[in-house]
Amino acid sequence: MFEKKISRELQEIEENNLLRIREDRNYDLLNFSDNDYLGLRNNKTIAKAMKKSIDEFGNGAGASHLISGHFQSHTNLELKIANLLQFEDALFYHSGFNANVSFFKNIINGDFDIFLDKLCHASIYDGILSTQSTVIRYPHLDYEALEQKIKKSKKEHKIIVTDSIFSMDGDIADLSRLYSLSKKYKTYLYIDDAHGFGIYGSKGLGLLESQMPADIDKSNIIHLTTFGKSAGLSGAIICASKKIIDYLKQKSREYIYTTASPPYLADGIIKSIELIIDGEKLRKKLNENIKLFRHLINKKQYLVNVYGPIQPILIKNNQMVIHIQKELIKSNIHVAAIRSPTVPLSESRIRVSISARHSKSDIVQLADVLNKSLKHVN
């Protein structure tokens, strides 16, 4: 019975043009689907730092952090991020998904009202599902609606939750306004800056650096930085007060009961952060590529009013999205076809992800194929 149910659901997924297909990476294709916004994934300086670390510390951590798998490399990374973003403390996790789940599962309980932007990342939703708190979703980026909802809350403890850059739409949260609301109503503020780190701020430290003074009181802020996008690697760090970080070290099963990330990863991230801080030219090149791409698309109605590296082409038709993706592959270009459940059924799209590594000719080639394909979209 169970396998019959699975077979029926798989058939329905395929019939609705929602089947996801995993394929080995094809290096012959021009890739516009990575989140490697600064092109650091293949950076030789980072690779050299990681190889040096492997020679010194070995291939893996050998144990969990609280047994014997925590190395000075991990501590150095945590201190570096905490100091750069001016938080009291920080904790390194395997991934942003793991970190988000860990925070909400372990820190937030039934005494909280959670005010959540409806387009926050799936990992935040998964974390919140494990709490017993009341979840109050507010319309995407609608801070007037958010304030009205906060006013109605009777709970002593409240938390506002947002992505900095929303991964499917590419639009940007107003952290300054959210911070003001959090102070006005004495709430915590949780910021997932997965897609902001590396590309926003004068030093590339993310949207918090870009929108807020460095010396603001961060005692009510919990901040997530991830390293699988602009940093070109993997892993994530939660920055917060020392008490919150200490509590996670004691209570987070996601942190305690897993082998620590290898020290060479932490050393590679440290080198990547140094390149990001000194990466003004990379950010300039990225912004030039974004402007060129938007300029070259003929049918501007399919573009979204965002100007970051995530450039959705809204098609709103699953079958047409798959068709356009196939046309791009025929031209040796890979772009992600995004459908439900990642986005609503009515908002399927081609998600173009632009990087500083792309040349002008790469952008022109992509725009030419997209322009030909978009002629056939009704």
Image (tube, rainbow, N blue to C red):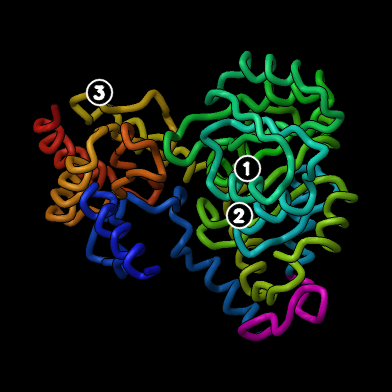
Which quadrant would residue 22 be assigned to in this image?
A: bottom left
What is the CA distance from the residue labelled 2 to the residue labelled 3? Answer: 33 Å
Q: How many C-alpha atoms fall within 10 Å of the one at disc 2: few (<14), some, or many (≥20)?
A: many
Q: Are marks 1 and 2 in contact (CB under 8 Å)?
A: yes
From the image, tell me which residue sits under label 2. Answer: 96
From the image, tell me which residue sits under label 1. Answer: 192
From the image, tell me which residue sits under label 3. Answer: 300
Mark 1 and mark 3 lie on one chain; the one further toward the N terminus is 1
Q: Which residues are magenta?
A: 57-73
Residue 255 percent across, percent down from the top left: 73, 66
Residue reaching furthest front? Answer: 1
Nearer-the-camera pick, 150 or 66:
150
Left or right: 74 as drawn, with respect to 331: right
Q: Is residue 257 above or below residue 281?
A: below
Q: Is residue 324 visible?
A: yes
Quadrant into which the C terminus falls? top left
Residue flagged by tag 1: what amino acid is it? Asp
Q: Please report the residue visible at 58 percent of the width from the left and 56 percent of the height from the top.
A: 227
Residue 309 percent across, percent down from the top left: 42, 39
Residue flagged by tag 2: what amino acid is it? Gly
Mark 2 and mark 3 lie on one chain; the one further toward the N terminus is 2
Q: Please report the residue visible at 60 percent of the width from the left and 60 percent of the height from the top.
A: 95
Residue flagged by tag 3: what amino acid is it? Lys
Circle 1 SS class: strand
Q: How many C-alpha atoms fall within 10 Å of the one at disc 3: few (<14), some, or many (≥20)?
A: few
